[in-house]
Amino acid sequence: MRYGRRLLFKNNFRNNATRRVAFHEYRRYLFHGEQGILKTTQCVVLPCEVSEGIRSPERRPRRLLSLLPPRSKRISQTRSVYFTYKVHMITFVSTPIGNLKDISFRAIETLRAADVIFCEDTRHSIKLLNAYDIKKPLLSCHKFNEREAAEKMISAAREGKNVAVISDAGMPVISDPGNIVCAQLKKEGVPYTIIPGANAFLSALVLSALPAERFAFLGFLPDKEGERRRYLEKYKNLDLTLCFHAAPQDVDRYISDMYAVFGDRNACAVREITKVHEESVAFTLAGGLPGQKKGEYVLVVEGAGEVQNPLNSLSEREHIAHYMAQGMDKKSAVKQAAKDRGLTKSEMYKFGIDL
């Protein structure tokens, strides 16, 4: 989306010299940042409906003279010309999840170039910024004020400011505030990007040594036991490695509920990722996780594997007879049994000819 200023001028210029005066006055207005409304004898510059913005330095303004009619075709009516510029992009910046050195050069450059930084907790983020001698205005963006923060970001971007967004640790939006902000930016057409970086659950997945070809990240589980078990039931039969965030006081409850829903499976608990006391412990859901729980955890649990249909243990003839006993006609029973076993109907039909 583009925004800009509107130049209103009358086409009754007396000569080319007057045109040049109007053009240079407008250039002076653009590049010297004069405030208010520029008025000359022949042109008036008014703000558009969008607030002031900053033109990218590499882009030159369109030549005003080329927009004016030839001298022989002057008319007295007022024409509107739009000089455009791009709204500054908002940047979501990934931050370290423990070790302050786990931040990219690009992330540091972006934070140093920012005019304002939105943080999940300014008290926490100031430690990271002080470590890299970054002194910038900080505004809060947490789960209770996301909509208000999004409006402030959009306003700042349209004013030509460089806006950066960070969370307390890791990648913004992932188990952190920011999803509502992204939706609002999309809706308003404001461009934004992400600088990737440290991520807790991906690091834990590698440290767990469990299958990593296909996986699902489920974040924090609900607080109440009933809701938690109903939530886990949705993913009971998935052949995917499952990753969960867990606070130390919740680890034992999570494992107990997983065992009740999933049955016994291999799992791994990873804590204090990238920190001095990083630890990765393999265990089973039936046996639980021994020891005292300290630090933030990521629980990685293996998937259900291929789910076997218990009817496949029957013979083909018994399989068809089972569905017929439930009230299906022979044709439907053969079709369903073939689907269960991964066979064609013609292959399955020969086993039920005499039924």
Image: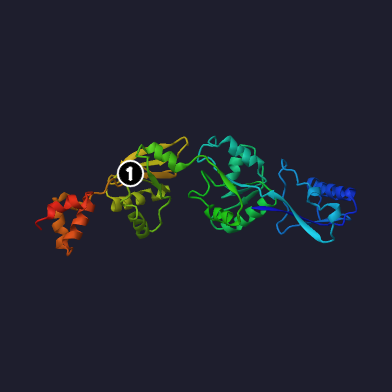
For this rendering, which residue is in front, 74 or 9? Answer: 74
Which residue reaches farthest left? 354
Which of 110/249 is in front? 110
The color scheme shown is: rainbow
Task: Classify the position of the C terminus by image quarter.
Answer: bottom left
Which residue extends farthest front?
Answer: 72
Q: Please rate how many residues cluster around mark 1, counting C-alpha atoms within 10 Å: few if below 14, some from 14 to 19, many from 20.
A: many
103 relative to 261 in the view: left or right: right
User: Is residue 2 something that shows in the picture?
Assistant: yes
Q: What residue is at 57 percent from the left and 45 percent from the top?
A: 193
Q: How many marks?
A: 1
Query: What amino acid is labelled 1 in the image?
Result: Glu
- Where does the image place residue 89, in percent across and percent down from the top left? 63, 47
Residue 33 rendering spot, x and y as whole percentages: 79, 48
Q: Which of the two residues, 339 or 33, is positioned nearer the viewer here?
A: 339
Q: Is residue 134 left or right of residue 258?
A: right
Is 88 placed left or right of 12 in the picture?
A: left
Q: Which residue is drawn at the image coordinates 60% and 55% (left, top)?
A: 150
Quadrant for residue 129, please give it.
top right
Q: Residue at x 69, y 53 (%)?
A: 3
How far across and how far down the image is residue 118, in percent?
A: 61, 49
Badge 1 marks a residue whose secondary structure is loop
For label 1, the residue is 302
